[in-house]
Image (cartoon, rainbow, N blue to C red):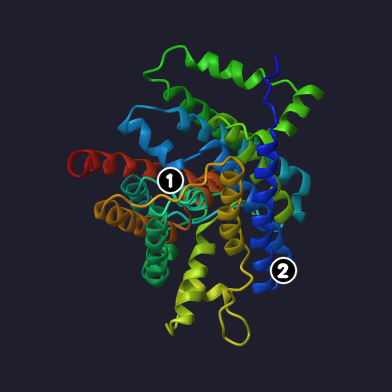
Amino acid sequence: MIRKYPVSKNDINRFFRAFILVCLLVICLVLRTEINPEAAITTGFGFLFGYIFQRSRFCFASAFRDPFMIRNTVLSRAVLVALLLNTYGFALIHLLKGDALPVSGNIFPIGLNVVAGGFIFGFGMVITGSCISGCLMRLGEGHMLQWFTFLGILLGAILGAWHFGWWKYYLEYFSPKLFLPDLFGWFTALLLQTLLIVILYILTFYDQKNRVTADLRKIFSVRLNLPAFKEAVSDIFSIRQLSYLEGAVILAITNTFLFFFWGKPWAITSGITHLCGWLCIKLGIAVVDWPYFQDNINSENELIFNNHPLLFLVIAMIAGSFFSSLLADEFRVSIPKSLKYILLSLCGGAMLGYGANIALGCNIGGFLSGTASLSLHGWVLGFFMLLGSFIGGKIFLKFIV
């Protein structure tokens, strides 16, 4: 049976008000700098990511934190579903494009930097109550506390970029790039990844009986028909809240299309770090010699920041969340209640930015896109993010709450 979500005149008015405001933001962005084709692609997809995040309340921090702190694994299961769908989506793109694919995904080396960075990042998620993608989503909703988190992320990111040369020693001498299909072949690699995700999915029901069957029925009960499609189109105006599972499926599909059109999967951290580099240049800080930025120096020995594609994706994610929150009449400017929360947001944000940079990825580029790319780096990063969240949760509950 199809649920009805009537469209009111106020819904339509909110849509056009939100649409006009976001168009103005896009025009300002275009006037500020010339958008190259890559940046145009990442801007469009970033907007979609921000919109989907806000509509589904998807949160990687909760997925890593809640199993230990409140014994809730609903978001953890949604993340695993997204991971499985992205794995096969990326594999399909490899099959379709073959040698024409510019890169094979987010495949990074494994070293002590991943161990330390993943742990610090996971700890920071608990302290600040957010991941980097969640912070961008909440910025679009009007949460002023997240501006302190974002400031912390900027500080941590530039510190990680400055300190990257020290970690690069371990990156070079102790860290191979392990692409699972190169080790086992595509069939075996996909089979092992699927089995591991399914096992983890089942383990999330350790204290919840009879939920595996219910979730599987929900996943396979989706019917594609014309009335359902019309109802989905009407949801654009009525702004139905998406479930975590729906958000996971849509995010995974969107990430797969980004990989197809751009040749690279979803990532965030390097865009934020290049924003930090641009700000350092404006403040007179010389960052040209830092190893982190060596791949982005032009023939004039100057850093290239204006058209970095992931910088546009970051801005577009905030805009997408802003559009969604305006559309659903959920945009609220909220003021931090105490200095303690501000300090926690700054410290936790700094840990997110630093950990993501030295580990070569955050919860999106390193874990989701990296693991779906069949890179062992993603699994190692995810494990130590989980460990950091576990220990961070224990400390948070004992000393901070």
Kind of element beneath mark 2 = loop
- Where, quadrant-wise, is the C terminus in this rendering? top left
The one nearer the camera, 164 or 42, is: 42
Between disc 2 and disc 1, whose residue precedes?
Answer: 2
Image check: 92 left or right of 77? right
Q: Position of residue 10 (x, y in %)?
A: 66, 38
- Residue found 74% across the figure and 43% down from its top: 95
Check disc 2: other Cα within 10 Å, few if <14, some if 14-19, many if 20+.
few
The one nearer the camera, 244 or 108, is: 244
Q: Is residue 313 above or below residue 90?
A: below
Q: Is residue 344 above or below residue 27?
A: above
Kind of element beneath mark 1 = helix
- Where, quadrant-wise, is the N terminus in this rendering? top right
- Residue found 24% across the figure and 42% down from its top: 396
| Residue 374 seen | no
Quadrant position of residue 247:
top right
Q: Position of residue 70 (x, y in %)?
A: 32, 29
Q: Residue furthest front?
A: 9
- Residue found 70% across the figure and 36% down from its top: 9
The one nearer the camera, 167 or 8, is: 8
Quadrant position of residue 342:
bottom left
Q: Which mark is residue 202?
A: none
Q: Position of residue 141 (x, y in %)?
A: 50, 48
Q: Mark 2 highlights which residue? A: 36
Q: Residue furthest left?
A: 399
Looking at the rendered structure, the kind of residue marked 1 is: Val
Q: Nearer the viewer, mark 2 or mark 1?
A: 2
Alpha carbons under labels 2 and 1: distance apart: 34 Å
| Residue 137 seen | yes
Looking at the rendered structure, the kind of residue marked 2 is: Asn
Q: Which mark is residue 380?
A: 1
